[in-house]
Structure formats: C-alpha cells, structure tokens
Amino acid sequence: MFSKADVARCGGRGRPGCGQLVRWTTTEAGKPLAVNLAPDLEGNTAVWGDVHGVLRSRRVTKVRPLDPWEKLMMPHAATCKGPARRRRIDPPPRSTSPPPPPRPQPRAGELYDRLGVTSTAAQDDIKKAYRRLARQLHPDLNPDPAAAERFKKVTEAYDALSDPRRRSTYDVTGRTPRPR
C-alpha cells in the first residue's frame, strides 16, 4: 500500500519542520498532510492509496469509522518537535575594494543649456539646435579634442531630450534618464 515515493522529510516542500521522515498524504480538502511512517492504533487519520497511487487521508469519526482498506495513522503534527536547529552560516566576507563611484548627474536644466534652448522649447527647436552644434563640434569637422568632448555631451543631451518620454522624466526628476 505504501511506497517509498510518499516518504519525505518534515520541513520539506518549503515548510519549516523537525527533519524526521514522514508520509505526505492529500486530505479530502486537497491539502497536504504529513503522517508518521508507521500505522498507529492511537491515531485519528485514515490513510489509503487511491487508484492513481496517491495517498489520501481523512479524519476518522464515529459517523464514518475506519474502512477495511484504510490504515490508522497518527498525524505528524501531533508528534513533531518543531524545526530542527540549524547551524548558523555566516555571510561571505565583504569585498575590500571600494564600490565604483556614482555616475555624475548633470544639474537640473543642464541638458537644455548644453543645446542652448529653454526648457519650454519645441521638439523642432531642439532638433535645429542639435544639428547646428553637431556641424560645429563633430570630430570629423573640428580636430580640437575639447570639441570632441563637448560633442559627446551635446549628443547625450539631444538623446535625452528628443524622446518625449525621457524628456518628461528629466523634467520631473532633473536626472538624465537611462537610454532604452
């Protein structure tokens, strides 16, 4: 009637427990119930195997006594001693290297200043300002290293302000939103 497949440890299946071996059954309500391994004459739970090999259980009462095909078992909750004490595991030591420095955020409104427009500028005005600055600062047209660095900042500002969703995020938070 019983198979080794029904046996598991108390505390298995994501529950805290004592670690003893028990049989897992399914109650008439569909809930899992652990019972002790051996049949017990003082128990109050009837256990039987259904046609699919699943262990089923129910409470034995005067109205519905033990049937001949059932075994009387003791629910493990009645004899469980509680969760087994586990040895404390210390967390791994922290890294001694310092965390990377935070990415510097431009001050609020700086992206508009980089392009030379106001915060109320239309999308067309932002696009025109970017194209004008790109013609002046592009590394292929201007060999100055400072111009190349300024071109990167202007491009970053344009990327953030040309997308309406990222621009509204910038207007609300004052921080450069991450590219998508």
Image (tube, helix red, strand yellow):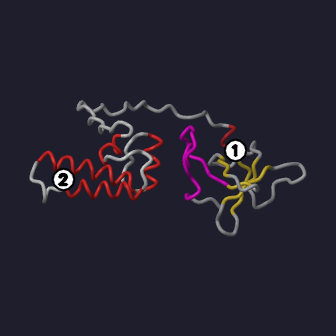
Can you give x and y, in whole percent of width and height, for residue 7 in the image? 57, 53
Residue type at mark 1: give it. Answer: Pro
Residue 8 forms part of the magenta stretch: yes
| Percent x, y of residue 100 | 26, 36
Assign the N terminus to one quadrant of the image. bottom right
Question: Which mark sits nearer the N-terminus, 2 or 1?
Answer: 1
Q: Could you tell me the amino acid type at mark 2?
A: Leu
- Image location (x, y in percent) of residue 36: 64, 46
Horizontally, residue 25 falls left or right of residue 144, namely right
Percent x, y of residue 104: 30, 37
- Which of label 2 and label 1 is nearer to you? 2
- Magenta residues, start to end: 4-25
Query: Distance between the Cα atoms at labels 2 and 1?
Result: 80 Å
Task: Return the residue found at the far bottom.
Answer: 51
**Residue in front for this viewpoint, 162 or 68:** 162
Residue located 39% across and 41% down the image: 175
- Badges 2 and 1: C-beta atoms under 8 Å apart? no
Residue beneath label 2, please? 137
Instruction: Judge whether 96 appears above or below 142 on screen.
Output: above
- Residue occupying the point 75% across, 53% down: 46
Near mark 2 (Cα within 10 A), the count class, few <14, some 14-19 or many ≥20, is many
Query: Callout 2: helix, strand or loop?
Result: helix
Mark 1 Cα shell of 10 Å, populated few (<14), some (14-19), many (≥20): many
Quadrant assignment, res 131:
bottom left
Left or right, 173 with reference to 1: left
Quadrant of the snapshot with the C terminus:
bottom left
Q: Which mark is residue 75?
A: 1
Q: Residue furthest left?
A: 143
Is residue 5 highlighted in magenta? yes
Quick check: 19 above or below 68? above
82 relative to 15, above or below:
above
Residue at image coords 37%, 49%: 178
